[in-house]
Image (cartoon, helix red, strand yellow):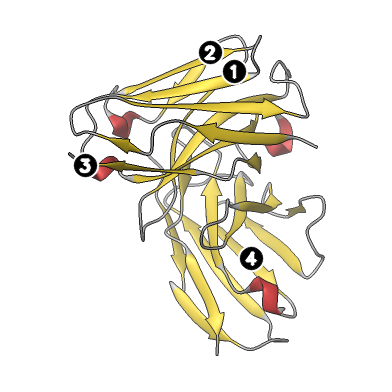
Amino acid sequence: QLQLQESGPGLVKPSETLSLTCTVSGGSIRSNNYFWGWIRQPPGKGLEWIGSIYYNGLTDDNPSLKSRVTMSVDTSKSQFSLKLSSVTAADTAMYFCARQGQSGSLYGSHDSWGQGILVTVSS
Amino acid sequence: DIQMTQSPSSLSASVGDRVTITCRASQTISSYLNWYQKKPGKAPKLLIYAASSLQSGVPSRFSGSGSGTDFTLTITSLQPEDFASYYCQQSYSLPFTFGPGTRVDIK
């Protein structure tokens, strides 16, 4: 069964870069049928799609984050990563990684998720 | 960006009730509409994809309908484990966007 697990610091200082990694197990990150995505939920608020990456490095991201997002993938480690630069308190959120359908009726849906990691931006 | 709205924002219901949640897109999204269940401290769970397709393992009391701009999630007989928040998400165009959520709590 596919499993995803986020890892990274739970506390980041303002203006610094948030860095998270998602490790995929129980399935191949090199699948042609899926992107690998990041979604976040600030405390008490709704869900926001951050972006996604294909196993070959192709990325899509949310323009609302004003080019602060960098994503990468390491297929040898079955991992993909998120970097969010110049963070502020508004970036405090639960961050989830998820598998994202790449085509057909599952396109854009997220059918497997990590448990999430809370990242707080504070000095 | 496509804006998603949901109504109601919250509702109170009893076990066994039929519950209907509505989602509306700011422009047509065909059937690229997904529904998720979210419980506090847990990851979202995909319930319905492509507006009306039931995700594997999801109970048949959940159903989705609609196309274009107006969509509905229905729970035919609410169970104790269904008390949660529900989010719609459009996957018609990037950036993918979610609705603000509907909280379903116990009456």
Check the picture and name the quadrant holding the N terminus of chain B.
Answer: top left
Asked whether the beta carbons under mark 2 and mark 1 sit within 8 Å of each other, the answer is: yes
Q: Nearer the viewer, mark 1 or mark 4?
A: 1
State the mark number for residue B73.
4
Q: Nearer the viewer, mark 2 or mark 4?
A: 2
Q: Is residue B30 left or right of residue B80?
A: left
Residue toward you, B73 or A7: A7
Q: Is residue A122 left or right of residue B2?
A: left
Report whether mark 3 lies on the same chain as mark 2.
Answer: yes
Identified by mark 1, the residue type is Tyr
Q: Which residue is mark 1?
A: A54
Identified by mark 3, the residue type is Ser
Which chain is disc 1 placed on? A
Q: Which residue is mark 2?
A: A58
Q: Under tag 3, what secondary structure?
A: loop
Task: Answer with mark 3 or mark 2, whichever residue precedes in sequence.
Answer: 2
